[in-house]
Image (cartoon, rainbow, N blue to C red):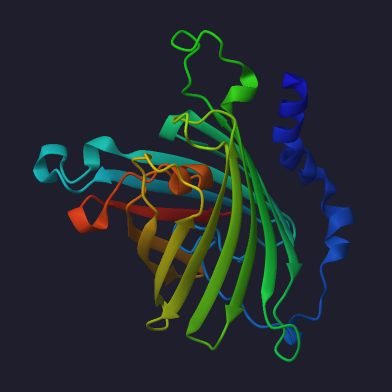
Amino acid sequence: MKTIYLILFLLPIVGFSQDDLLSEIDTNNAKDFESAAFKGLKIVNFESTKMVSQKELYFVVSHRFGSIKPGFEDFFGLDQAVTRLNFIYGISDGINVGVSRSSFLKTYESSLKLRLVRQQKKGFPVTLVGFGTLLINGALDDVNLPLLKFENRLGYTAQLLIAKKFNKNFSLELIPTFFHDNLVQLDEQENSQYALGIGGRHKLSKRLSLNIDYGFHLNRADNAPFNNPLSVGIDIETGGHVFQLHFTNAQPMNTNGFLGQATGDWSDGDIFFGFNLSRVF
């Protein structure tokens, strides 16, 4: 069973060799399609419908400081920072694979992003993208959990990203989400969890946009100490790249984390500042 899980985790990496075959999926009639609804690979926390182009490799450094609430005690979160390193490769313009490592729970993750349909200028009204991940929680300690098995470390995510660009300045996305953790913190919490995300982008100027996303958790346990994630950010376009600054009440950056374990509270000033930096190869 452990071998099967490892194979599933490594599938996106194996896919790097398939670019010649899979590139046939994409169409060349770009003039018939609406331009990108989002400039960044993420809205803020949620994945956007933007894709990495064929044979491009993105290296994304995501940094999220601790809560700003303690003030100078933790230097507004500097002492409690979380970092995520993410590599994303475009097998084709419509198929992306990724691998990442986050310091939150020492999480390793592989991902697959597949564009199903593109919004057309005179035709299909939205862009549909499928997104899935497999993650491994590396922080679980078999000394404290003597019955721990490898499969207890695993989590999964499946999302459908539904985006529409209404005009040159405004785009909106809905994200129905299923995520599953083989081991949850609360006995009352179901392992399989459901959420509905919503996010939008409003262009402020040629190089600036305001981004907001929110996740409605649909079956959270009544005694859970966690909150729905609300995030606000600014995208800054610089020479073809996007630099993202944001505030959010969720410190984790993996989907299972920010949807299932957001501890911050906007009404109490318990929020986290962060940013995403990307490099294209």
Residue lying at the far bottom in this picture: please name it.
122
Task: Tell me: 123 left or right of 70.
Answer: right
At x 46% / y 44%, what residue is drawn? Answer: 260
Res 224 → quadrant: top left
Rendering coords of residue 3 (x, y %): 76, 21
Q: Is residue 230 visible?
A: yes
Residue closer to the observer: 183 or 125: 183
Q: Is residue 93 visible?
A: no
Residue 215 vertical position relative to residue 154 in the rendered view, above or below: below
Number of disc labels:
0
Q: Horizontal and vertical percent for residue 127?
A: 68, 73
Q: Is residue 75 left or right of residue 88?
A: left
Q: Looking at this view, is 176 or 4 the one in front?
A: 176
Q: Is residue 163 left or right of residue 40?
A: right
- 221 lies above or below 210: above
Q: Is residue 256 left or right of residue 24?
A: left
Looking at the image, which residue is at 41% across and 42% down?
261
Residue 22 falls in image quadrant: bottom right
Observer-nearest of 25 and 56: 25
Q: Position of residue 52 (x, y in %)?
A: 64, 60
Screen quadrant of the N terminus: top right
Q: Is residue 269 above or below residue 27?
A: above
Q: Percent x, y for residue 246?
A: 34, 60
Task: Give the residue drawn at x 64%, y 44%.
Answer: 133
Residue in the image at 66% along x and 54% along y: 131
From the viewer's perspective, is residue 184 above or below residue 268?
A: above
